[in-house]
Amino acid sequence: MKYAPTIGLEVHAELKTATKMFCGCPNDPDEKHPNTNVCPVCLGHPGALPTPNKKALEHMITIGFALGGKINEVFAFDRKNYFYPDLPKGYQITQLEHPTVLGGTINVEARLGSPKTVQIHHVHLEEDAGKLVHADDGKSSLVDFNRGGVPLMELVTDPDMHSAKEAVAFAKELQLILRYAGVSEADLDRGQMRADANISISATDALGTKVEIKNLNSFRAIEDAINYEIKRQTDLLEAGERIKQETRGWDDVKQRTVSQRSKEEAQDYRYFPEPDIPPQDPSAFDLAALERAVPESPDAKRTRFKEQLGLSAEQANILVEDRAESEYFEEAISEWEEDLQHQLDAAQVALLFNYLNTDLKGLMANAGISFADLKVTQENFADLMDLLSKKEINSRTAKDLLARMFESGADPRNLVKEEGLGQVSGEGELLDVIKAVIKENPKAVEDYKKGKMNALQFMVGKSMAALKGRGNPAVLKDLLQKEL
Ligand SMILES: [Zn+2]
């Protein structure tokens, strides 16, 4: 029998703010000293009063606009009561009845290569818990409350995905949207983003029994855990057994999901409205200004790159994956077009893309440098491409110059002028060089006349060397053949 999987995701992401959600402690994910950024509010001391972080709520509104969702008519907080050692208050402040954002969609076609839009149910705001560190002796655990009370977004999708690939595409696109919007670094490696997946399978239109897999902390884990769970559930049904509604965890080492608690053991969180925080009125925020400030979405940028610049889908995907790189690329294009006083043609755009994506990014990767620290300005990069495309320098010189620009931030036109690196194209000088090469290599000339094409290539190489790389091999080859 053929079972169709249905998947919904709940994605958590820590919001980028100066201070925590309900107190003035720094929200610093890089703080190495445990229990430094703590106070009576985030430690849950009796009588301490929470004050909602305005920036965190603004970020939530930004997320709502970026996802095309609806900003709710009222934002209100609720208490979710449970005991766990990383939660000193004994409850978490979250939004149950009145989340900040309702609905919204993410289009993941660019990642899947086939049309797919995932519907979002809502996005709410809550506070993160502390972090437990389990000691090596296996007997004790330590707790660090630096993360406790950090603003955390939770996005819940509809059960709208049908494969692990779709779920991963969704999570990756959401990460990119959050980064573009500047609301979260959403770095899974640093625990800033993590997902729970709800998975059921069914052979009919009715949904099957749902199993939740908690705390998936890499894209690989999301993909592997979902694939594992689809297979586990399929095997159970085919063996005539039933699927238990339960919460499972993902064991990355053993590559399998493991039962954590069944429905019968599910906790009753005894939610009730947070008595210390009055409901928030959205009109207290400048919604129009927040909406205007939302940047172009990654998907809109991909479309624009393809339609306006003639990039392939793959090229557009590569550039847009890194907002800084896509902005550098666009800036270099506009610098070059400003110089030329006209639009670039497809070959020029392709040249710029290749030198950026292969050569410049290669240098950056080797040196461990980001676009923010790059010394090669967009203007200088455009100038280098211009010299190359006009054949004033050859590709070998271009690569050498780029490496030097990368070190010093030098202007390529100055380097070419000062060091006479321009490609030699005057026939007189070239002919002198060629004649000398022919004279000095009688054996090669003989071989060439016997029809050995290698010999011609050898003499092109000798000519290039004599010109210190400033010649054009195709032109040299042509002249050599005529001369011989
Ligand atoms: Zn605090």
Image (cartoon, grey):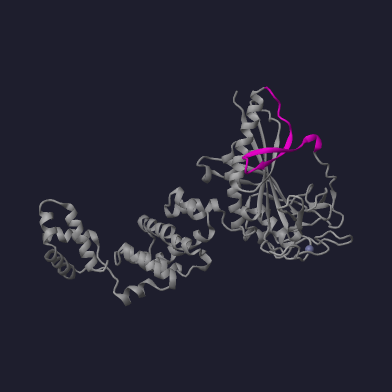
The answer to whether residue 483 is above or below residue 408 is: above
Query: Where residue 112 appears, x then y in whole percent?
Result: 52, 42
Query: Where residue 394 appears, x then y in whole percent?
Result: 30, 64
Number of residue marks: 0
Membership of 258 in magenta stretch = yes
Query: Where residue 255 appears, x then y in whole percent?
Result: 62, 40
In this rendering, position of residue 407 left or right of residue 66: left
- The extreme bottom residue here reads 418
In this rendering, position of residue 443 left or right of residue 55: left
Which residues make up the magenta segment? 240-265
Res. 447 image quadrant: bottom left
Residue lying at 76% horizontally and 52% vertically, measured from the top left: 73
Query: Where residue 176 appears, x then y in whole percent?
Result: 58, 53
In this rendering, position of residue 481 left or right of residue 304: left
Membership of 316 in magenta stretch = no
Q: Is residue 445 visible?
A: yes
Task: Write down which quadrant ligand 1 falls in.
Answer: bottom right
In this rendering, position of residue 427 left or right of residue 313: left
Residue lying at 29% horizontally and 74% vertically, measured from the top left: 420
- The extreme front residue here reads 137
Q: Is residue 340 visible?
A: no
Res. 441 image quadrant: bottom left
On the rendered image, what quadrant is the N terminus found in? top right
Seen from the viewer's position, the closer of residues 194 and 344 is 194
The answer to whether residue 20 is above or below residue 249 is: below
